[in-house]
Amino acid sequence: MDIVAIVLSLLFIFFLFFFFYTTGKSCPGGAKNPPGPSKLSLLRNILQTVEKPHRSLADLSRIYGSVMSFKLGCLTTVVISSPETAKEVLKTHDHVLSYRVSSDPVRAAGHHELSLLWIPPLARWRFLRKITRNQLFSTQRLEATSAIRTRKVQELMNFVNKCCERREAVNISRASFITSLNIISNALFSTNLANFDDSKTFHDFQNVVIRMMEISGKPNLADFFPFLGFLDLQGARKEARLLMHKLFRVFQGFIDTKRSSTSRNNNDMLDSLLDIAHKKESELDDNNIKHLLLDLFLAGVDTSSSAVEWAMAELLRNPKMIVKVQEEIRQVIGLKGTVQDLDIVKLPYLQAVVKESLRLHPPAPFLVPRKSESDDVQIFEFLIPKNTQVLVNVWAIGRDPNVWKNPTQFEPERFLGRGIDVKGNHFELIPFGAGRRICPGMPLAFRIMHLVLASLLYGFDWEYQNGVVPENVDMNEAFGATLHKAEPLCIVPIKKRV
């Protein structure tokens, strides 16, 4: 740990002591507060909480219950860790818990004031959500862009085939990221933003996306102690601003090119946005468009590629399961040679593999933090005070032993013959959230995950490089707004057995 990190840690602990002993929990009218760790107990665990909060808060919830509260500085937080309590938050009280708490880095460049992800669920939010649904995520638009996804996945397969011929390992994180990136960028701008032979461009985009998700998701001093915000002690806001503006310059370049073109075919999202912006009294301008594109770009690319990598990693640790899913895929696809969207419904075991991977490794371990807008919100017997941050720990729900048998084991069979989906109807499996603020990009992300994973498994057999055995593979996580493998999965493709 360097000197800056040590100083920041000491400052953090100092201010925690200060606020622990100058503030306390109160509840209007003597109503019952959710239980939680004592101040000293929380202080003992605080550094661990900062490092991997989804795990440490899950551990604390096993002690204090599925509705647990604690206070850090000025911020009171309630953690939700069971399907029953998640249903209360995301369905029963969705109308008063749909506002969101933005972290300090998210507020860089004023993103929280324009972002579909962060603005209140009022008229402007409904306007932006309607645009994204109609122009990008509707069934009609997804069917119209199916050929793009098939083409981008074929480019992935061509790259993997070259690696196979050279007996080179494929970095699944990199390969799936480039594929997801180009699927999203073609839907948004009708162009690729990376290719498999250009490492620099790929690393630029991946570094921006992953770093944005890391600093957006990690605890920040300015969130607990707002009066310290102007100091930006962790440098997160400055870094977030630089990263956002880097992407904004890319988006502005596409906007300028589209505007200067003599003809637009309305084939992509940006064409549609510019047409809407051109109308009289439109609510969209270039700045609004860039912030909307930022939401779509960050959320769409990172979650899909991360999910593919986790699924491949789990399958390779379970040889019988990878053989089973490959047999299913190869029987359905046969000699056709290409997996397409319409094939996915015929692959129940593949769908079970994806669900099981999302259960164990949800792309976002916490749903986007919500905020209580009323003093009257009650989750079972517990009152949630106004302005309380509400965290739904999806990672903990997916590993709840009261819900899942052998919760830490990868067992896709648990989903066969069961009607559990990820569309917000079953609160034991909500990787994309639920209620009015369910992830709008879920239909596209779900298609990308299945298509990429099925294609990799259909076209090749796989093995670890350098004689690595499955038991020794590092399955640790790197925490952020999304949950990545700490060590990228690098595996060798082999020509499939006929």
Image (tube, rainbow, N blue to C red):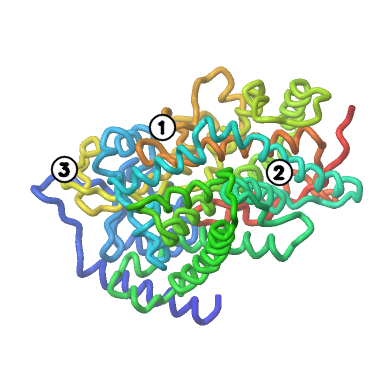
**Above or below: residue 14 compared with residue 154:** below
Q: From the top left corner, tell me how far across and down residue 368 is, in percent.
A: 40, 49
From the viewer's side, name the closer residue of 3 and 457: 457
Residue positioned 49% across, 48% down in the render: 364
The residue pinned by badge 1 equals: 427
Mark 3 and mark 1: span between their CA atoms?
Answer: 23 Å
Kindly identify the residue that appears in the image at 24 percent across and 48 percent down. 372
Secondary structure beneath disc 2? helix
The percent coordinates of residue 155 (x first, y second) are 76, 45
Residue 344, above or below 257: above
Q: In the image, which is nearer the foreground, mark 3 or mark 2?
A: 2
* Amino acid type of the residue tagged 3 in the rendering: Asp
**Mark on residue 152?**
2
Q: In the image shown, does 282 or 8 lie closer to the viewer?
A: 282
> Residue at the location (43% across, 53% down)?
278
- Tell which tag, 2 or 1, sits nearer the viewer: 2
Q: In the rendered image of this protein, does residue 214 appear above or below residue 88?
A: below
Which quarter of the rendering shows the C terminus?
top right
Let me know if residue 44 appears in the view.
no
Q: What label does residue 376 carry, if any?
A: 3
Q: Looking at numbered disc 1 in the image, what kind of residue is underneath it? A: Phe
Give whichever of discs 2 and 1 has the lower sequence position. 2
* Amino acid carrying mark 2 in the image: Lys
Image coordinates of residue 84 in percent, x first then y, are 34, 32
